[in-house]
Amino acid sequence: MARSTNREYSQIFRRYEAILEVFANMEREERLMNYKFLIALILTSHAKKIQNVAERKKLFDLKNQLYFSIANNKPNRRKLAFKYLVSKNFRVIEFCQNCTKKNTEEGLERHKWKFCRDCQVDRKFYNVLQMSHHFENGTMSLYISNDLVPQVDNLKVAQKGKLENGKEEGRYDKFHYNVKNLDIFNLESVKKIQARLLQISP
């Protein structure tokens, strides 16, 4: 684990040192699973800050590979909890003629357009499947988008919740590891670790 003499960064490094020490002392199966969770969160953090759409998709694809590697592994499955999180936002696929005319006449920006029951709306577009795992004094949580849910084998989800109340992050003790700040890690190194984790037999 890298260290810094700069007081501004010492707490940041301590945060990662804490969770990696915990992982290192776990049994192999548990350790590998939690490494996959953490690397997936790091990839998500980088992806959310990349402007290039194609590059962002590549990183999310790498993250999703780890998600499915965890979710579709039988020994892991008994340690996981899944919840379908429903968003309050809708994606309007196509506005009806009346709404198109009205919104245009009012001079509204496209992302502020209003819609009605005659418009074509996808109410599940922003919904996600949350996969979470609890370990002593900590939790890990990842999302995949609604359209990727069928790729999780033999999934039976009884629980539903609100997306606004969920968080895609890791927690250990007093520390939070969320997708807002995990891009502190070098992306090329993270990609190599991701590939290695997928090669290791669980």
Image (spheres, grey):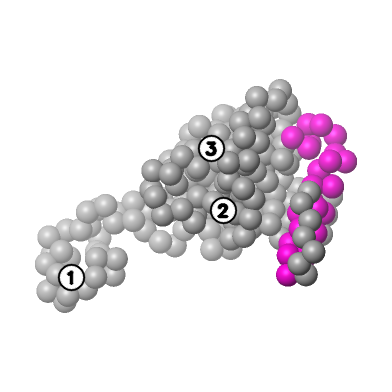
Q: Is residue 200 above or below residue 30?
A: above
Residue drawn at point x = 50 percent, y = 32 percent: 151
Q: Say which amino acid is labelled 1.
A: Asn
N-terminal of the pair, mark 2 or mark 1, is 2
Q: Residue furthest right?
A: 25
Q: Is residue 50 left or right of residue 158?
A: left
**3D distance between C-alphas at marks 3 and 1:** 39 Å
Q: Which residue is mark 3?
A: 62
Range drawn in magenta: 8-32
- Closer to viewer: mark 2 or mark 1: 2
Residue drawn at point x = 58 percent, y = 41 percent: 188
Q: Which residue is mark 2?
A: 45
Q: Say which amino acid is labelled 3.
A: Leu
- Closer to viewer: mark 3 or mark 1: 3
Query: Which residue is more in the foreground, 1 or 131?
Result: 1
- Residue 87 can be seen, yes or no: yes
Residue 15 lies within the magenta run: yes
SS at mark 3? helix
User: Percent position (x, y) of residue 189?
Assistant: 63, 41
